[in-house]
Image: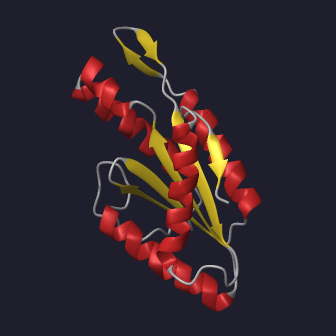
């Protein structure tokens, strides 16, 4: 099956940049409202990424980020958009209800915990905190609402110590 994603300028990770992903979220949000379909958003943060870099060096940090980027690309559909918002990863899921988004978020969370990242022949434990939101009907009038709701859900996870998934609302 051919990947029909738009060309992405971030060739290293295959992820959309901050500006690109916000633009795509805005477009998909408008489509979802116009054609009355659901749009979900997953916001993911690698737990203790800064500490990993401080402890093991920038190369290990980069390796963890690249491994997570690869995992997100492999486990998303060709109609989904995967990008970076600063230190965080975002997955925009057109035509996806809250159950589908939650299922994917949990699957991604679990697969990140299974990543095989090694430092000095020892496996490094990697975990992630994940927030999920869904734009449903006419509740949201601005595209960034769905992102803010995912950020709030992610904030809930982080306030509980991370390494889990939370739904907005």
Q: Residue furthest top?
A: 121
Residue 75 visible in the current orientation = no
Residue 144 visible in the current orientation = yes
Question: Residue at the location (33% across, 9% down)?
Answer: 120
Question: Residue at the location (49% across, 20% down)?
Answer: 125
Question: Residue at the location (70% across, 81% down)?
Answer: 137
Q: Quadrant of the C terminus?
A: bottom right
Residue 125 versus residue 43 in the image, above or below? above
- Residue 13 percent location from the top left of the image: 35, 49
Question: Residue at the location (37% across, 57% down)?
Answer: 85
Of 52 and 79, the residue lying toward us: 52
Question: In this figure, what is the number of numbered marks?
Answer: 0
Q: Residue furthest front?
A: 159
- Residue 114 percent location from the top left of the image: 57, 27
Q: Residue furthest right?
A: 99
Side of 4 relative to 48 (left or right)? right
- Residue 124 percent location from the top left of the image: 44, 18
Residue 61 versus residue 8 in the image, above or below? above
Of 169 and 88, the residue lying toward us: 169
The chosen color scheme is secondary structure
Q: Quadrant of the N terminus?
A: bottom right
């Amino acid at each position: 099956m051919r990947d029909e994603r738009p060309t992405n300028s971030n060739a290293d990770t295959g992820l959309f940049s901050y500006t690109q992903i916000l633009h795509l979220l805005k477009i998909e949000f408008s489509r979802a409202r116009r054609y009355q379909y659901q749009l979900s958003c997953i916001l993911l943060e690698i737990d203790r990424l800064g500490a990993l870099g401080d402890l093991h060096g920038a190369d290990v940090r980069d390796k963890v980020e690249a491994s997570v980027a690869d995992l997100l690309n492999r486990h998303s559909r060709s109609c989904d958009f995967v990008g970076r918002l600063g230190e965080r990863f975002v997955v925009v899921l057109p035509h996806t209800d809250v159950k589908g988004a939650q299922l994917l978020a949990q699957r991604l969370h679990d697969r990140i915990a299974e990543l095989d990242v090694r430092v000095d022949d020892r496996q490094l434990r990697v975990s992630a905190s994940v927030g999920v939101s869904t734009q449903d009907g006419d509740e949201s009038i601005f595209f960034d609402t769905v992102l803010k709701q995912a950020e709030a859900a992610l904030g809930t996870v982080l306030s509980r110590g991370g390494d889990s998934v939370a739904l907005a609302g």
